[in-house]
Image (tube, grey):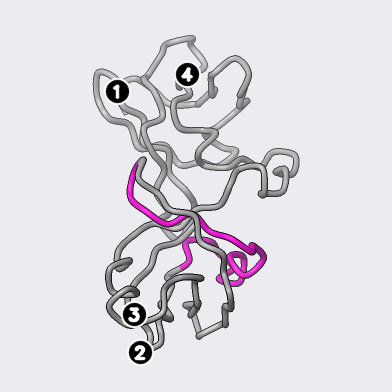
Amino acid sequence: MGRIAAPFGVKGWVKVQPYSEDPGTLMDFGSWRVGRGETQAHFVVEAVQDHGAALVAKLAGIDDRDAAYALRGQEISVARSALPAPEENEYYWSDLIGLTAVNREGVELGKVDSLMETGAHDVLVVKGRREHLIPFVAAFVGGVDLQGGTIEVDWGEDY
């Protein structure tokens, strides 16, 4: 949901770069998981403030600049159970990763490896025999079957 960019001040506050469209989204959660990969620590958020396009936060147990500096570059996440259910035809990126992309002719193009934000729209990064960058818009993406593990795309093998 974001990352810790740098220490902020000398009392353990950190500057946070949110990944969501609304920087204030992280302000709705009373605790964050902070870390890299599988190594994460749970922190209670003592205070958080809007700071332009970023946030500044005070995490419990992080009481000086050195402790805040040690968190620099680490990812921020929250428990999946704490997130609201997505609306109809909306998906969390993490739900799309790993789905098999199948085109309208029934050809498997590969698996969704990641997504990237381009400003205009999100793009599926599908890796198979080759890499496909497929805009995640209705013109190119049909049905998403989370239970079946597939995503239907209007995309040729040679695109």
User: Counting residues from the N terminus, which is met first, the one under dot 3 or under dot 4?
Assistant: 3
Q: Nearer the viewer, mark 3 or mark 4?
A: 3
Q: CA distance from mark 3 to mark 4?
A: 46 Å
- Kind of residue sitting beneath label 1: Asp
Q: Quick check: is 28 in the magenta stretch?
A: yes
Res 44 label:
none
Instruction: Please rate how many residues cluster around mark 3, counting C-alpha atoms within 10 Å: few if below 14, some from 14 to 19, many from 20.
Output: many
Q: Nearer the viewer, mark 2 or mark 3?
A: 2
User: Counting residues from the N terminus, which is met first, the one under dot 3 or under dot 1?
Assistant: 3
The magenta segment is: 18-37
Q: Label 4, secondary structure: give it.
A: strand
Farthest residue to the bottom: give it.
Answer: 9
Q: CA distance from mark 2 to mark 3?
A: 8 Å
Q: CA distance from mark 4 to mark 2?
A: 54 Å
Q: Which residue is mark 3?
A: 7
Residue at point 33% right, 31% down? 132
Q: Quick check: is 85 in the magenta stretch?
A: no
Q: Nearer the viewer, mark 4 or mark 1?
A: 4
Q: Which residue is mark 4?
A: 103
- Kind of residue sitting beneath label 4: Asn
| Residue 112 x/y as whole percent | 41, 29
Residue at point 57% right, 69% down? 45
Residue at point 56% right, 82% down? 50
Asked if the residue at tag 3 contacts the one at tag 2, i.e. Cβ–Cβ closer than 8 Å, the answer is yes
21 w.r.t. 15: above or below: above
